[in-house]
């Protein structure tokens, strides 16, 4: 080994999670190096649905417009369907994201952004270019192995081509995927559920299928017939699709070559003459797991290295990217010497319960999906599904479709989770609890600070989400001018939300955030409320200073 190098944070794994971590750290002035063992970015999109909360983060990082520009057009992604064939099949049922104007209004009130369908192989280049523009460092064809660590840093062997370097990093983020070599090397165990199926995913282009479905509003269609059970997803632009179907465990992997996959695809599509240009084929397992520990000394797990979910609900990539939003601001402040090392323990305290909740819900989504006949179908039933005598089977599937509601309408799951840790200062109240589908905005400590449209600066409609600039932020009620003076004295930014600034008629900032006009909330860099003060204290500066000390340094006596 030779060429000893140093960096603040070494990120192992350059997929969407590793890239997101590197981008945030670099923007905050941290010397971060992201290494990726592959020689290219992803060719197969393991993920394609991006939740609105993740788009909010992209908005803050300055890349949301690029991600949305690469997304499936909105009119093609309004819902999901069940059918016997993609083209010319019998419609069995559907779930739409917004069935009525009231639901559309609630969705718009939750966030300044909507979710979108942009494939992972389009998201990664956008993240990489943003990282390089910010002056970040990224290396393809490079592996990394943690050798040892001490109180000052981590020693890592980094190998690229025929050169192995010794790197000393203050911290390491392992975003090296489902089969994380870093997790295994550190002997971190996982709590797992049994594998409940294997699938084959075919990523392909087809102009003809796109043309034939141009008026369809369905982003994803489950196909159920006697020949094959599978799903079609139109992802992004450029006529790109994914077809997933069950893998027969009796057949070897080698059997699932392009010819077999295309034949299955044609059976399911109902368009035997459609052009099929296969981009890639991926075999994958339906499984779930969460790492028992997300930290080993100075090494942290993120994304699939820390958790993996069944695909039903689309929480995999989204959860991983949101992991990094939680972890990176804490690393930045520890590295800059303004926070105690103990702040890093709150990463697992806050994000592991989110992963466990998401696993439970995604497993429930999977169980419900079985009731439609999509998984574990009875061949004798499916033999009649396209015939007149198959009407009872079709009715049973149609009757089971409404139970899929939570898989596709998960605003409460996306926005409503409330962190509990030593980096959150409780205020003695019980929070309103969101359900999976219904999000209840709240300024309760630990909650993601709710979105509201405000007039700020004067004459400029702006979301409260956009006020987050990567640092702590004070949001005060309309009689909270004293908070502004106190915040300025501590080097913090404060926005006093006057009554005339709230853009939505009948909406009060104070009522949504649960404070009096003289109260305020301290919003953390990740957009979650760290502290809420219901009414103005006699010493707002002292309260803010004590709050920062408790969050950053764990001081409970301040």
Image (cartoon, helix red, strand yellow):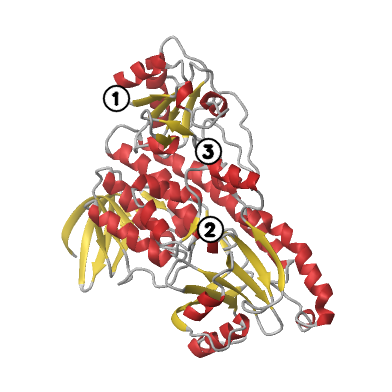
Element marked by disc 1:
loop
Q: Which residue is mark 2?
A: 190
Percent from the top left, x then y, of residue 394?
78, 72
**Residue that protrudes farthest toward the top in the picture:** 538
Tell me what residue is drawn at x 79 percent, y 79 percent. 381
Residue 66 in sight: yes
Mark 3, secondary structure of its residue: loop
The structure residue drawn at horizontal position 42% and vertical position 35%, both measured from the top left corner, is 461
Which of the two residues, 169 or 11, is positioned nearer the viewer here? 11
Does residue 222 appear to the left or right of 466 in the view shown?
A: right
Separation of disc 2 and disc 3 at Cα? 22 Å
Estimate the x, y position of residue 131 in percent, counting from the top left. 28, 55
Q: Position of residue 473 (x, y in %)?
A: 38, 30
In the depicted structure, whether residue 385 falls above or below residue 322: below
Q: How many marks?
A: 3
In the picture, residue 194 is in which quadrant? Answer: bottom right
- Report, in whole angstroms, how far the alpha carbon at label 1 lies from the one at label 2: 42 Å
Q: Could you give the CA–CA distance between mark 1 and mark 3, rounded to whole angstroms?
A: 26 Å
Q: Residues within 10 Å of mark 2 (few under 14, many from 20)?
A: some
Q: Is residue 478 left or right of residue 288?
A: left
Q: Which picture quadrant has residue 152?
A: top left
Q: Nearer the viewer, residue 213 or 288?
A: 213
Most extreme residue toward the left, as rendered? Answer: 3
Say which residue appears at 51% left-offset and 16% top-offset. 535
Which quadrant does the C terminus fall into?
A: top left
Secondary structure of residue under mark 2: strand
Mark 3 Cα shell of 10 Å, populated few (<14), some (14-19), many (≥20):
many
According to the image, label 1 marks what residue?
491
Which numbered disc covers residue 419?
3
């Amino acid at each position: 080994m030779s060429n000893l190098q140093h960096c603040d944070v070494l990120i192992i794994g350059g997929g969407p999670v590793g890239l997101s971590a590197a981008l945030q750290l670099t923007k905050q002035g941290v010397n971060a190096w992201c290494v990726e063992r592959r020689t290219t970015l992803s060719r197969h999109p393991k993920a394609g649905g991006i939740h609105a909360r993740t788009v909010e983060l992209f908005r803050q990082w300055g890349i949301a417009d690029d991600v949305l520009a690469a997304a499936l057009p909105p009119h093609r992604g309004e819902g999901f369907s069940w059918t016997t064939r993609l083209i010319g099949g019998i419609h069995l049922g559907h779930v739409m994201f917004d069935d009525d104007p009231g639901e559309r209004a609630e969705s718009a009130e939750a966030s300044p952004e909507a979710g979108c369908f942009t494939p992972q192989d389009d998201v990664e280049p956008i993240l990489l270019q943003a990282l390089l523009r910010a002056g970040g460092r990224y290396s393809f064809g490079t592996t990394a192995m943690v050798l040892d660590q001490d109180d000052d840093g981590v020693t890592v062997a980094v190998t690229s081509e025929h050169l192995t370097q010794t790197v000393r990093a203050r911290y390491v983020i392992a975003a090296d995927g489902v089969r994380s070599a870093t997790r295994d090397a550190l002997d971190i165990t996982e709590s797992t559920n049994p594998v409940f199926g294997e699938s084959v995913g075919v990523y392909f282009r087809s102009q003809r299928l796109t043309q034939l479905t141009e008026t369809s509003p369905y982003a994803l269609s489950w196909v159920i017939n006697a020949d094959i059970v599978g799903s079609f997803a139109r992802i992004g632009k450029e006529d790109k699709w994914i077809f997933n179907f069950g893998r027969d465990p009796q057949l070897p992997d080698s059997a699932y070559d392009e010819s077999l996959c295309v034949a299955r695809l044609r059976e399911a599509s109902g368009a035997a003459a459609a052009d099929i240009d296969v981009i890639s084929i991926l075999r994958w397992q339906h499984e779930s797991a969460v790492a028992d520990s997300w930290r080993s000394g100075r090494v942290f797990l993120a994304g699939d290295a820390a958790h993996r979910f069944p695909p039903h609900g689309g929480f995999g990539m989204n959860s991983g990217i949101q992991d990094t939003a939680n972890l990176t601001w804490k690393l930045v402040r520890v590295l800059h010497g303004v926070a105690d090392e103990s702040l890093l323990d709150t990463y697992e305290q806050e994000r592991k319960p989110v992963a466990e909740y998401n696993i439970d819900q995604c497993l429930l989504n999977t169980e419900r999906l079985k009731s439609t006949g999509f998984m574990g179908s009875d061949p004798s039933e499916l033999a009649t599904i396209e015939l007149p005598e198959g009407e009872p089977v079709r009715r049973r599937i149609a009757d089971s479709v409404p139970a899929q509601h939570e898989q596709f309408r998960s605003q409460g799951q996306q926005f409503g989770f409330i962190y509990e840790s030593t980096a959150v200062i409780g205020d003695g109240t019980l929070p309103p609890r969101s359900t999976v589908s219904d999000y209840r905005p709240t300024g309760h400590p630990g909650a993601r600070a709710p979105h509201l449209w405000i007039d700020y600066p004067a004459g400029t409609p702006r979301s409260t989400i956009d006020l987050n600039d990567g640092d702590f932020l004070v949001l005060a009620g309309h009689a909270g001018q004293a908070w502004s003076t106190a915040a300025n004295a501590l080097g913090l930014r404060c926005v006093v939300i006057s009554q005339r600034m709230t853009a939505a008629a009948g909406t009060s900032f104070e009522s949504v955030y649960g404070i009096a006009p003289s109260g305020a909330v301290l919003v953390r860099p990740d957009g979650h409320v760290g502290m809420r003060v219901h009414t103005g204290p006699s010493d707002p500066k002292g309260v803010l200073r004590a709050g920062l000390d408790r969050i950053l340094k764990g001081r409970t006596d301040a």
